[in-house]
Image (cartoon, coloured by chain):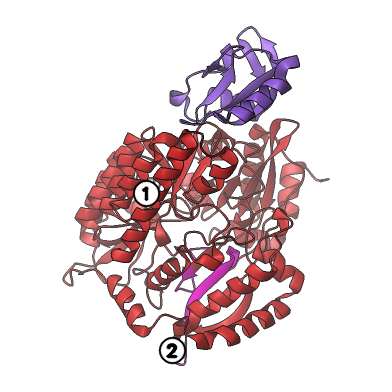
Amino acid sequence: MYRYDQYDQALVDARVAEFRDQVARRLANEITEDQFKPLRLMNGLYLQLHAYMLRVAVPYGTLSGTQLRMLAHIARRYDRGYAHFTTRQNIQYNWMKLEETPDLLADLATVEMHAIQTSGNCIRNISSDQFAGAAADELADPRPYAELLRQWSSFHPEFSFLPRKFKIAVIASDTDRAAVQLHDIGLQLVRRDGELGFKVWVGGGMGRTPMIGHVVREFIPARQYLSYCEAILRVYNRFGRRDNIYKARIKILVHELGAEEFIRQVQAEWAEMEPRGLDAPQAEYDRIVAQFAAPDYDRAAPDSLDRSDPDFALWVDQNVHAHKQPGYAIATISLKPVGGIPGDASAAQMDLIADLAERYAHDEIRVTHSQNLVFAHVRKADLYAVWTALNDAGLATPNLDLVTDIIACPGLDYCALANARSIPVAQKIAQRFADLDRQHDIGEIKIKISGCINACGHHHAGHIGILGVDKKGEEAYQLSLGGSGAEDASLAKILGPGFSEAGVVDAVEKVIEAYRAVRSGPRERFLDTYRRLGDAPFKAAVYGAVA
Amino acid sequence: MRLLTGNILETGDVVWWTGHDWSLHLRDAVDVDADGDALLARTLAEERINDPALVAAEPTADGPRPRTMRERVRGAGPTVRLDLNRNPA
């Protein structure tokens, strides 16, 4: 894992001191809320429905046990004993007090963490593949490249006041576990003629105007990707719309200019600036890469697994993935117990996971954009012990990518922007489909729920997407089908008129039962059936023959 | 009826205007109707309550009931963590 150097630590410590002073001035009424609000947002502190909410960055979703234990401490000391993992691999606390935030941030800084650039019109947390460094199908660990982007984008003076927020994701596999095509910039590590480089997408995103990114470059050598990203940001910063917040994202610029013209402008910018030597020298790449060296694997670790406990075997089949190192596996910890709140974890659960990571998983935990956690490096021989401990803590639900593994934003239960609640809908759907045999029969299906058009719950990318809307002060829900945030990215389409909360749960069940009736066989995924047949059978099931 | 509400600067807690002070409990809120706009302007100027707003409500036997789901959730707390609610609407 990357460890802060003196500059990283000094920057974070200085920011904590600066914010402490800003908070003191606000509490003393020396500055107004209008003056203070942008300052607190730059430190990840929002005001939500019930209290302040703090969003803490988890760079590319990687945590150490020490860091996770600190996050648990913060939940206990400053919050109400729990926290929420987000769809951008971050963590949020819902019950913050402004007057305590400087102390909290000081605690966080002791474990090389912060909340800087988790809000505001700047480059946000760089996200990545939760299986990075472990996946059997990756070219190389993408995180050193994400880390260099983190360093480049942190306090970048030119990009601290962009037209709008900016999100970058980096992967290194053909299997996309980070939704790169739905980011402002998506980077996939590829190899050409023996050289590593990146395929680059620009202009993807969700929100009120969902778009799939355009490929703007099939290959940029890895040694030049940073200057190329800078060229993209410079074009966006210069021409992105600042007159209309709803048209300010880079996706709108790419759409309005046309991909071809946008690429031409980026190319011209890059040709001008690349020779100036903005890319990091090889020694700096090497320094960072060295910090992501593979763990000290047990080369004698047995590759076999005792599957005699049927509950354990079920979990292995659903939540465990192949590792590139023989004798090892990748284990996903479900934060989606049936009836639970997707992505929430208690302080006690975080402490337990930290302990298990230190003991069994080379001291690493990953956060997924699907709001689960991952042990990326576990000896197969240790899997049973890990599962047993997780199971005792309610963390071993064998439902990864099944109908109860639902993404849900905080929605109107917490969020000041939301129009409708998301979590209760997720809970009711999960309870409706609680039977594991039924879940396995349905197979892979990704339900994603957002409480407003901002789409933090990724409903546009759901096989089944649910959007909460406001209907004269009451909640209503739109149903969409056919989205995907994976390598086969697509945007879900609205099926028809909306529903009440109870109605949308019934509608989801009707859609799924229609799928079971018309699929070509048990191996055809819901998404593939939808793509093969279109929405007609689902409309008929939900609305009747005349929809 | 209209209620005056906001969040305390220091803690972020949701509060309701009682006619002479702020309360954490929705049931203590009073109808500010004719005085609402003046009270809102004063609250904004004092800079101690964030996001102050006037919200429409109905009187009930259990106290005021905000008309929108959003304000009812603000008043009662998250519907998914009833253990954390302090003042059910």
For disc 2, the chain is A
The circle drawn on residue A232 is none
Name the residue: 32% across, 53% down.
A313
Membership of A186 in magenta stretch: yes
Side of A530 relative to A349 (left or right): right
Q: Position of residue B59 (x, y in %)?
A: 68, 11
The quarter holding residue A327 reads bottom left
Residue A2 visible in the displayed image: no
SS of the residue under disc 1: helix
The circle drawn on residue A195 is 2
SS of the residue under disc 2: strand
Depth check, front residue: A383 or A286: A286
Residue range highlighted in magenta = A170-193
Q: Which chain is red?
A: A
The tint chain B carries is: purple
Q: Position of residue A335 (x, y in %)?
A: 41, 45
Side of A147 relative to A526 (left or right): left
Q: Label 1, on which residue?
A: A17
Q: What is the three-letter code of the residue carrying label 1?
A: Ala
